[in-house]
Amino acid sequence: MQVETFHPVAWLAWLAAAALPALTTRNPLYLALVLLAAGTDFIALGQRSETAQGWAALVRLGALLWLLTIPFTMLTNHYGQIVLFTLPESWPVIGGPITLESLLYGLTGGLALISLLLAFAVFNLAVDQARLLRMAPAFVYQSGVVAAIAVAFVPQMAASWQSIREAQQVRGHRFRGVRDLLPLILPLLITALERAVQLAESMEARGFGGVQTAAAPRDRLAVQATVLVGLALAGLGLAGLGFWPQHRTPVLAVAALGLALLAWSFWRQGKRVSRTSYRRWYWGRGDRVVLVTGLLAASAWVTVLIARSEWLFYYPYPPYSPWPSFQPILGAAILLLAVPALLVRRPSQELMPIDPS
Amino acid sequence: MIRLDHITYAYPDQKLPTLADFSAVIEPGEFVLVVGPSGSGKSTLLRSLNGLVPHFYGGTWAGRAEVFGRDPLSCAPRGMADLVGFVFQDPEAQFVVDTVEDELVFAMENFGVPVGTMRKRLEEVLDQMAIAHLRGRRIATLSGGEKQRVAIASVLALQPELLVLDEPTSQLDPQAAEEVLVALRHLNEDLGLTIILSEHRLERVLQYADRVLYLPASGEPALLGDPRVIAAQLPWSPPLLDLGRRLAWDPLPLTIKEGRARARDLATRLRAAPQPAATPPRGPESPPLASVRGLHYSYGGRPALRGVSLDVRPGEFVALMGRNGSGKSTLLRQIVGLLKPDQGQIIVQGLDTRNAALGDIIRGVGYVPQDPGALLFNDTVVAELAFTRRGHALIADPAADDRLLSRLGLADEAGRDPRDLSVGQRQRVALAAILVASPQLILLDEPTRGLDYEQKHELAALLLELKREGRAVVMATHDVELVAACADRVALLAEGQIVVDGPAREVMSDSQVFASQINKLFRDPRYLVVDDVLAAAA
């Protein structure tokens, strides 16, 4: 499979814009629009990716769980004024009026989770996570590589799990209880450990960690001192928020100063590792469109969140109305998220000028 | 130049040193082949060249090493990486990132190579290893041979002086191994790159080597010298060399070409030898132990087996051969009932695998998977046997266990932890853990991976003994010489279909790829192994 992905920064903007509604409102109309927009992108992107099937299964599972929770909420929650029908009071727990409000409540709760899940699925289809991790700045570069390895490790573990299970099955191993897990877990751990050691050896032999230019002792001392002071100030600031809630501004300033010092020392640390990056990201036309639409949608949402947060409020039970409000401007902002789907339809080479060949 | 001076090294917690007072000098541009039985210190020696030993493993080290002007001990592996390229045995476990291009530039990024230079070198190594068509691929989608070539290219990108490879082809099928070796030879001859390579299968590399370094199992001093000279002193050797030594040929032939030239007279004589009396027609054939009929199977829409039919009778030794991905392993897993047919049926000892419980099928069928590590988890070898007995609801029988272990040459290992044993021993423990249930049909998936000559001989002898007891063996393998020595029937798979199924002598002697060395020498179905020739020549 050829690897073609979009610019991760553009899609980070898209992800933020798509996740914001799910995190800040329960209004089913907006959430349904997010679901619609992300779903369109998912279908469009899924055509060019093998991992789409896995994600589709995950989303389906999420949807199934969501559908199962709705009757549960309806049957156990008897508040609300619009009664759909009534079960005999003599039935324990589920007896009583079944209301439209409960139905809506169950519907909206899962909707937020599903749209969040779908947004992440789309992001993963559009962007290669391993490369995203490796874009990390120099001082977290090593953690980035470690995380990338961990991501690649999972499918390998799944494969060895399969072969171990088969090997034990044909020895007559049957799974009856927790104790029977041992013949499966032990070989898995040993295999994983052996593989990890081998990988570590391979990375060592290939100069992982980069060539560190030795720092002058004074320089090193300065960086270490800065880390200490920065940590102390940041901790003081965060603790201070609890102790002196009336002095928010000075306390926050102290915390910010601490964090800034930490960032500076990490940056200094990173400068000492001389490392170059082969992969350069290109902003294709499509990427710019994704970035702009993502930013537009996100900023519209943030503006409303700050200035008109009552637009986003929704709670089906009395004393509030079960009928959600709707602002066309917000709806339009959300629908912007579906724009990437329109771009993908054209031949993919045009849109993914990533390969620097 | 590489100079190793009186090196003595012992791994942590080991009393006996793995390398004892070892000295050698290797000149730039040499192609040195390192041979020796498992556990003789081949890997240790190779790892000392870039400092992985002792930096990565710890242990005690004495002596001085100098590799192209640097001391691996003081530079550490990280500091040697631009001088010594190291390629490991397992193509799966040495990749850090997930696409070919990223993998090739990984080391250069670590060394801060400027982007312009990086691009130039990337193009160079893509061409050197002939992998330009793979550049955008995900590593997981490559074949074993492609993976090893990517691994070699990724260390070449730093333009090392020395390339060290630790059994790079032991996990590959013959074709893929050939690709890798041809690429190495090209690097050595056309670019003058120094190459130090360890390898079990001498027949493939001996002809390319300038010198051979032989590390004996224990105590005896190492030998370094001309391939022909060293080859004459090895305790075991590939069939061609073996024949040459038995017939006292001098000089010893290293390639089939040399062998054919040397054996011209013998070949004429052998061809004239009387045809052996046609084998008497066997009595009424016993009913098959396993019978596969019109088997179709696919993994998630990708067909793996397409219309396979195969009968296995008691006392038969069937070799399944074919490329990686041709369906050999799938067929074995079908026969033992781990997979169920999509279409067609499999009858194993009267049970239809479609509706029989796995627990019933395995009473008569033993399956040894490729990786013995997937099987073994108990603290001792005897506990492994006991575990299988419990699984099969058999009563404990320590006396029988002891007999089985001594037959497999594991009597002294009964109380040891299987994880501490050598690859060959672990393979035999896995076999013991299966044989303890006395299956009539034994299925083996690539049993010789990573085994040296001696271990392979032992395995072959054991399998032949099982066959003589009237059990049937079905073995998926790439190992042509093992098949020539053991199998009486070969089924060749391609793309999920059996393309040929016939007596081993016939199938192997009219094939280019699957002919044994001796057969290539005489091109006569009567001569597959050394003993065939010696018997006829006597």
Image: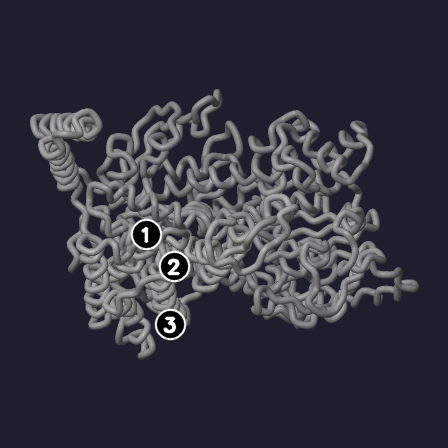
Mark 1–mark 3 distance (CA, rounded to whole Å): 25 Å
For marks 2 and 1, the one nearer the N-term is 1
Task: Identify which amino acid the numbered label 1 is placed on.
Answer: Leu
Pinpoint residue A33: horizontal percent, then vertical percent. Answer: 35, 66
Q: In the picture shown, does residue B363 fall above or below A27?
A: above
Chain letter of disc 2 in the image: A
Circle on res. A115: 2
Label 1 and label 3 in one chain = yes
Q: Residue at x 39, y 70 (%)?
A: A48
Residue under label 3, please give it: A44
Chain letter of disc 1 in the image: A
Which sits in the foreground, A108 or A33?
A108
Chain letter of disc 3 in the image: A
Q: Residue at x 26, y 66 (%)?
A: A327
Q: Secondary structure at mark 2?
A: helix
Which sits in the foreground, A46 or B154?
A46
Left or right of residue B286, residue B300 in this image: left
Q: Residues within 10 Å of mark 1 (few under 14, many from 20)?
A: few
